[in-house]
Image (cartoon, rainbow, N blue to C red):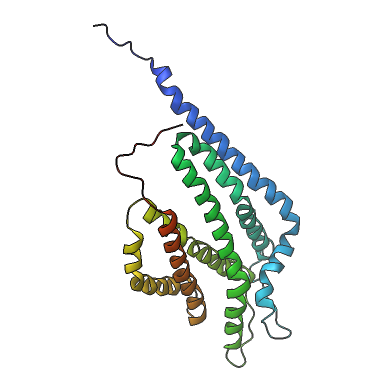
Amino acid sequence: MSETPEVPEEQQGQPLIAHLLELRERLLHSVLCVLLVFLCLFWFANDLYAWLARPLLEKLPAGASMIATEVAAPFLAPFKLTLVVSIFLSVPFLLYQAWAFIAPGLYRHERRLVLPLLVSSTVLFYLGIAFAYFVVFPLIFAFFTSTAPSGVAVMTDISRYLDFVLKLFFAFGLAFEVPVAVFLLARTGVISADDLAAKRPYVVVASFVIGMLLTPPDVISQVLLAVPIWLLFELGLVMARRFGGSRRGGEEPTAT
């Protein structure tokens, strides 16, 4: 019996090198996209910050304003905000680059699952940010400004305010991913939808614990995060029961 000829090491390394080159190209395109969006938005950096500060400014007492306690803060705060907004706006393109990189290695049924999950998770993240800006911010800033002791002027530093709202944006954006997480748990067979429903009391308690950890120490913002997490968990259960059936055992997927 003849021996199988050895494949030269140069040819063995080609697939890995090709994947690394493609990954570098995808990353370069992603960075260029963020940079392009940033350059387009940079001239409107102060306008973006004014828009972000509006929920607080509308609740401040008459004659009050925000302040900058650091020399470079009037430039750095809008600059940082513009960079974050550029990344947020580039998320669909960034996810497309990730999808284009991993799609060739997926089975057909995995492609049908991953793409809708990427789209839905992006939409839910944006919805979480919108909920925080239009619903949560007006309520918590009205609460904070109304509870200031007599003789205390509410004058928030622009850098601290930016860090505060970005933290809430990420908290609510991630919280709105709960339906996707519940669906994946059921779809991959880690836990069934019925078992998740049976753990509802623990989920409710965990929702309020997460709300306590990710939001400022006030009841309003904690409830405004905990209740959506619970409701989104229920939405995830509905999705899992309807679309989250596991693949039949013994069925081997066919790659395309």
* Residue 47 sits in quarter: bottom right
How far across and how far down the image is residue 36, in percent? 69, 46
Q: Which residue is at the front of the view, 107 or 93?
A: 107
Residue positioned 66% across, 57% down in the render: 82
> From the viewer's perspective, is residue 13 above or below residue 193?
above
Q: Which residue is at the front of the view, 79 or 245?
A: 245
User: Which residue extends farthest bottom?
Assistant: 150
> From the viewer's perspective, is residue 202 above or below residue 44?
below
How far across and how far down the image is residue 149, in percent? 57, 91
How far across and how far down the image is residue 49, in percent? 69, 65
Tally of numbered tags: 0
Q: Which residue is at the front of the view, 83 or 11?
A: 11
User: Which residue extends farthest left?
Assistant: 1
* Quadrant in which the N terminus is drawn: top left
Q: Is residue 159 left or right of residue 225?
A: right
> From the viewer's perspective, is residue 125 above or below residue 231?
above
Residue positioned 30% across, 43% down in the render: 249
How far across and how far down the image is residue 139, in percent? 59, 80
Residue positioned 42% across, 18% down in the render: 11
Q: Which residue is at the front of the view, 189 or 209?
A: 189
User: Which residue extends farthest right?
Assistant: 43
User: Which residue extends farthest top?
Assistant: 2
* Residue 239 sits in quarter: bottom left
Residue positioned 72% across, 54% down in the render: 41
